[in-house]
Image: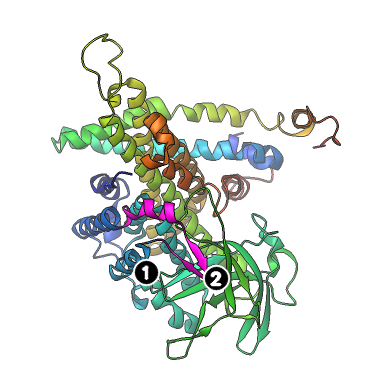
Amino acid sequence: MGVADSLVRDPNAAAVASKNYLMLTGFVCGGWQMARAARVARAKLDAGEDPGFHGAKLATARFYAEQILPQADALLKIVRSGGSSVLGAAGGAILNAGHEEAPPLRF
Amino acid sequence: MTTYLAPTRDMRFVIEELAGLDQLTGLPGYEEATPDLVEAILDEAAKLAGEVLAPLNKTGDTQGVHLKAGDVLTADGFKAAYQQFVEGGWNGISGAPDHGGQGLPELVLAATVEMWNAANMSFALCPLLNAGATEALKQHGSDALKAQYLPNMISGTWTGTMNLTEPQAGSDLSAVRAKAVPEADHYRLYGQKIFITWGDHDLADNVIHLVLARTPDAPEGVKGISLFLVPKFLVNADGSLGPRNDVHCVSVEHKLGIHASPTCVMSFGDQDGAIGYLVGRENKGLAHMFTMMNEARQKVGIQGLGIADRAYQQARDYAKDRIQGRPLDQKSGDRVAIIQHPDVRRMLMTMKSQVEAMRAFAYVMAADMDLAHKHPDATERQHRQARVDLLIPVLKGWCTELGVEIASTGVQVHGGMGYVEETGACQYLRDARVAPIYEGTTGIQAADLVGRKLAMRPGCGDGGT
């Protein structure tokens, strides 16, 4: 079962994961377009067209792949960890700590 | 604050090579959108953005807006700049030609929206909201309403707003309470709306509010919300402006950023009720408003991109000039510009590469919007629309979150000088900060992506594997 399907099955866990899932999707979509840009730039370079400009495009795509895109791996790991550390008693314990005099929050 | 140079070469690379301008030029109505014309448009837009809008960015930030005797007054220079914007036809570049628009692709509009926002985000919000209101009216308004209001909104002589939020109804619009009481051929509206961007101002002759409200017998919740058009000045049958309507700005907010963009508390019906006209069908207001919201969310995503590029341009200029320290592997000799230092270079490249990734993503989506409207094949139109629907929350959420992060990195590149207002880097961060909030917070976008869009995929949900 894929990440998307498991998110759809459990709405509370999905709500915990959804922002990270959105950012993950963004970085992947960014990588998708940078890869397309790199392919175009490579072809233009091979054809000898505006090497300064297209060389920079290729270098930018490489930088993105090495220095930016790996954030998606970390986000995927977070998304896969599910929502149990936020939901239920575990999450309540975090937010109640230090406020013992107040009525405890229950999730 | 430094100048803004629109990166037209980069924009054309994305437009032509990644978003596929050539597939749009073949579509009915887009025949004129050739690479040469697009280049000419981008060059003109770049001039307006760089020479007129960008120099007003700091003035607007410093002066803000003022509410005086019920009217909102904008910062010095904004009115003249807006006049130039209208005269250039920039409001209507993708507007319907039968109402005076130029009918150019969303793809071209996207590039201009990036420029306006990079140059002056506060200013750019006025046409941004106008575009959303225009789209909602175009899709859902009666022919009579469209004939009376659309041409002036497309030209920008009048500007549109969206009035959704009330003090108790923010992300949860089911709590909307504003009332609309039927009377003859119109309605009378009563209630208060907050956070109304460009809700009142002195740039245009009239302000056209699109307002969510409930009719007296409407059901509870979102199923009882209708959409109304409420003009600041009533419009006579001959198109001339009539008396002042009973809708007023009662205060403007003091905000972290976008100081030159009035954020208004609007009061409807303090005297005898604000006259309004139903847009679309009763109780379908939220669905109609979503037309406008999708449009606005796409453009707010582009705001994140625009402000990030502006922050990058300024940080790069500063890093090239600022002399500090020697290269790590040299103990003596000349001190160097900080752009020579690996960590500064990494920061700048992080900014630049993400600007390019966002731009490619945003423009490709704009081309998908064009294909979804105009492709001759129905299956292809549906396929493109499905991709747009799925990815609009990603564009809005991801690009605006990155906008903040990149503007913050821009401050960091400047070091201590970045934290000083005079340098101008902080303004981008303050301005950028609103984008992940308005038009649906990142949390709302994420819920839309995961809770609605993924759940709607064929074969997903109800136990499918």
Q: Secondary structure at mark 1?
A: loop
Which is nearer the eye, B149 or B3? Answer: B3
* Residue at x-position 84% and y-position 34%: A104
Kindly identify the amino acid type of the residue bearing the numbered disc 1: Gly
- When the figure is inspected, residue B421 is found, relative to residue B265, above or below; the finding is above
| Mark toward the start of the polypeptide (1 vs 2) | 1
- When the figure is inspected, residue B45 is found, relative to residue A3, above or below; the finding is below
Neighbor class of circle 2 (other Cα within 10 Å; few <14, some 14-19, many 20+) is many
Answer whether residue B29 is visible to the viewer in this image: no
- Mark 1, chain letter? B
Q: Nearer the viewer, mark 1 or mark 2?
A: 2
Magenta stretch, residue numbers:
B53-75
Residue A88 location, quadrant: top right
Total numbered labels placed on residues in the image: 2
Outermost residue, left side: A48
Answer whether residue A65 is visible to the viewer in this image: yes
Kindly identify the amino acid type of the residue bearing the numbered disc 2: Leu
Determine which of the numbered discs, if any, sits on residue B95 in the image: 1
Neighbor class of circle 1 (other Cα within 10 Å; few <14, some 14-19, many 20+) is many
> Is B237 in the magenta?
no
* Residue at x-position 48% and y-position 44%: B430
Colour approach in the figure? rainbow
Image quarter of the C terminus of chain A: top right
Residue underneath mark 2: B210
**Residue B299 in the image, given as x and y percentages of width and height:** 44, 55
Give the spatial CA distance, label 1 vs label 2.
Answer: 18 Å
